[in-house]
Amino acid sequence: MKTAEVSQAHELDHPGKGMLDEFLQPFMRPAVIDLSQHIAAAKGLDGGAANTDKVYGRNDDPAVQAQYEQQQLKREDHQSGE
């Protein structure tokens, strides 16, 4: 095993000592308060900006839930018609 792999394995056995901090640093991002803005700004799986994606509101909003249910019904109808 390489030295880095030994350190990482040791950290898994003995967490909380900061051994993986340097390794994981490139993946760290600041915490966000409004995640919906970040989701809306995220690129699609094809790498392009997904201009058709919209965040309609909170998922506990009954109006938003109804809209998503309608979307799901349309998707199921489309799939059953294939």
Image (spheres, rainbow, N blue to C red):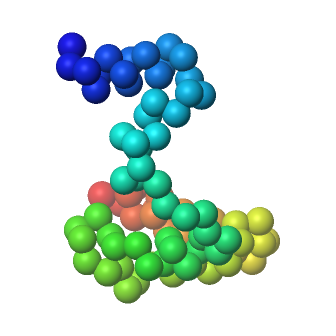
Residue 1 seen in the current view: yes
**Residue 66 visible in the shown view:** no
Asked if residue 65 is positioned above or below residue 37 in the image, the reply reads: above
Foreground pick, 50 / 1: 1
Residue 47: x and y, percent? Answer: 24, 71
The count of marks equals: 0
Quadrant of the image containing the N terminus: top left
**Image quarter in which the C terminus is found:** bottom left
Of residue 73 and residue 54, the one placed in the foreground of this image is 54
Q: Position of residue 17 (x, y in %)?
A: 56, 27
Q: Quadrant of residue 53?
A: bottom left
| Relative height, residue 2 to residue 32 (above, below) | above
Residue 29 x %, y %: 49, 61
Question: What residue appears at the point 40 percent right and 83 percent down from the top-left corner?
Answer: 52
Query: In the image, what residue occupies the spot 42% across and 49% down?
Result: 25
Across and down, in percent, residue 27 comes to: 40, 52
In-image side of 46 versus 64 (left or right): left
Q: Is residue 67 above or below residue 30?
A: below
What residue is rendered at 43% in x and 16% in y? 10
